Amino acid sequence: RCADCNSQDPEWASVNLGILVCLECSGIHRAMGVHVSRVRSLLLDSWEPSLCEVMKTLGNDKVNEVYLDGWRDAAHEGGINPNAPREEKERFVRAKYE
């Protein structure tokens, strides 16, 4: 599931954050810049072993525990609804990571 909107079968990853994200959320991550999130495709990009280890070590659950700590409403809901408008998703994702 996407670390931000909980949509199923994400095909993108933020390699520095160690999370999986859906296509729409990956676009939001890209727009924040590489100083916040470095996005790669799970299917199209090559993956060095060290990046695979980062993903295995971190992962959505651990990262969300950190970024949603103290943000109980979002943590309880598991993020934003996958059917929310893009503008609402963008506000949520930016508030979470920036």
Image (tube, rainbow, N blue to C red):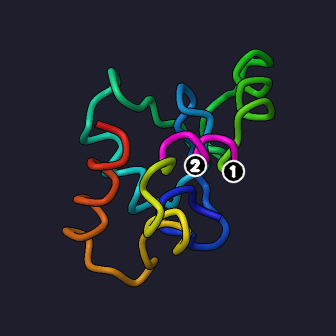
Residue 57 percent across, percent down from the top left: 78, 30
Query: Which residue does the image show at 25% across and 42% down from the upper left?
Result: 31
Image quadrant where one finds the N terminus: bottom right
Question: Is residue 50 depicted above or below 79 in this figure?
Answer: above
Query: Which residue does the image show at 52% across and 37% down from the upper left?
Result: 14
> Mark 2: which amino acid?
Asn
Query: Which residue does the image show at 45% across and 50% down from the upper left?
Result: 70
Say which mark, if any, is on residue 45.
none
> Within the image, what quadrant is residue 82 found in?
bottom left
Residue 98 percent across, percent down from the top left: 28, 36
Residue 38 percent across, percent down from the top left: 44, 29
Q: Is residue 18 left or right of residue 70?
A: right
Question: Is residue 25 depicted above or below 8 in this figure?
Answer: above
Element assignment for label 2: helix
Check disc 1 and report the residue beneath it.
61
Q: Is residue 86 left or right of residue 12?
A: left
Q: Residues within 10 Å of mark 1 (few under 14, many from 20)?
A: few
**The residue stretch that appears in magenta:** 61-67
Task: Please state the total of marks drawn on the protein image.
Answer: 2
Q: Is residue 5 magenta?
A: no
Check disc 2 and report the residue beneath it.
64
Residue 85 percent across, percent down from the top left: 26, 78
Asked if the residues shown at circle 2 and circle 1 are in contact, with their CB atoms under 8 angstroms apart, the answer is yes
> Mark 1: which amino acid?
Asp
Query: Which residue does the image show at 57% across and 49% down from the upper left?
Result: 64
- Tell which of 88 and 52 is nearer to you: 88
Question: Is residue 29 depicted above or below 80 in this figure?
Answer: above
- Tell which of 59 and 69 is nearer to you: 69
Q: Residues within 10 Å of mark 2 (few under 14, many from 20)?
A: some
